[in-house]
Amino acid sequence: MPDFGNAGKITSRKRDGAVDVNVGNKEYLYFKVQVTGIKPILAFDCAHKRHLFNTAGSPPQQTYEWTLARSQPFPGLLNFSYDGDPDGYALGMTFTGAPIKYTYLVELRDKTDQLIKKVEDVDFESTDPSDVFFEGLSVDQV
């Protein structure tokens, strides 16, 4: 029986689903999606707006990286700010180019970019092009 859709498989190494971020200490979240396969279509949204959207017409990438609330953006990386507290975020993935695998990593980092903890480290894969999946993450600022 699939984990999602018709043929979806989830391999979870770490999957908290929620994280507290100490913005007073300049903690932030680092996100990375590694793609194996062709035609990745993904979106990163919060309850208030869409932050990142890769359409079918976008040039495919193997790696997508961004940060949430880093005090100074990394060169070449998108850096999003908080819209609410608490806020819910979701990574939406389609499998149109199946077979395809998305490896989703979320890390809580300190102001010197050192890892505090992994929040998410999960593979989502499918061989069915009709499958879609949304992975949620609740973020609280403390």
Image (cartoon, rainbow, N blue to C red):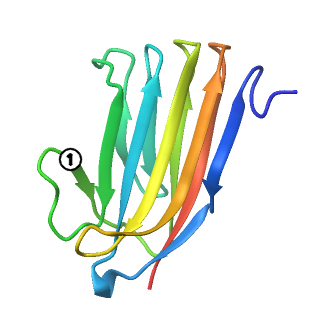
Which residue occupies the foreground of this view, 78 or 31?
31
Q: Residue at x 33, y 19 (%)?
A: 60
The quarter of the image holding the C terminus is bottom left
Is 48 on the left or on the right of 110, as rendered?
right
Q: Is residue 116 left or right of residue 99?
A: left
List the residue tagged with mark 1: 77
Give me the residue at 16% from left, 55% from top.
74
How far across and down, in percent of the image, does residue 108 sit? Answer: 42, 67
- The image shows residue 23 at horizontal and vertical percentages of 33, 81
Q: How many marks?
A: 1
Determine whether, in the image, residue 91 is placed left or right of residue 128: left
24 relative position to 137: left or right? left
Amino acid type, residue under disc 1 in the picture: Leu
Q: Residue furthest left?
A: 75
**Residue 71 location, quadrant:** bottom left
Q: Is residue 95 above or below residue 84?
A: above
Task: Work out which quarter of the rendered image holds the N terminus and state it.
Answer: top right
Q: Secondary structure at mark 1?
A: loop
> Residue 113: image x %, image y %?
26, 67
Where residue 111 appears, x then y in whole percent?
Answer: 25, 75
Q: Residue at x 63, y 35 (%)?
A: 133
**Residue at (63%, 62%) from the top-left corner?**
16
| Quarter of the figure with residue 22 | bottom left
Mark 1, residues whose alpha carbon is within 10 Å: few (<14), some, or many (≥20)? few
Is 91 located above or below residue 112 in the figure?
above
State whether residue 34 is above or below residue 130: below
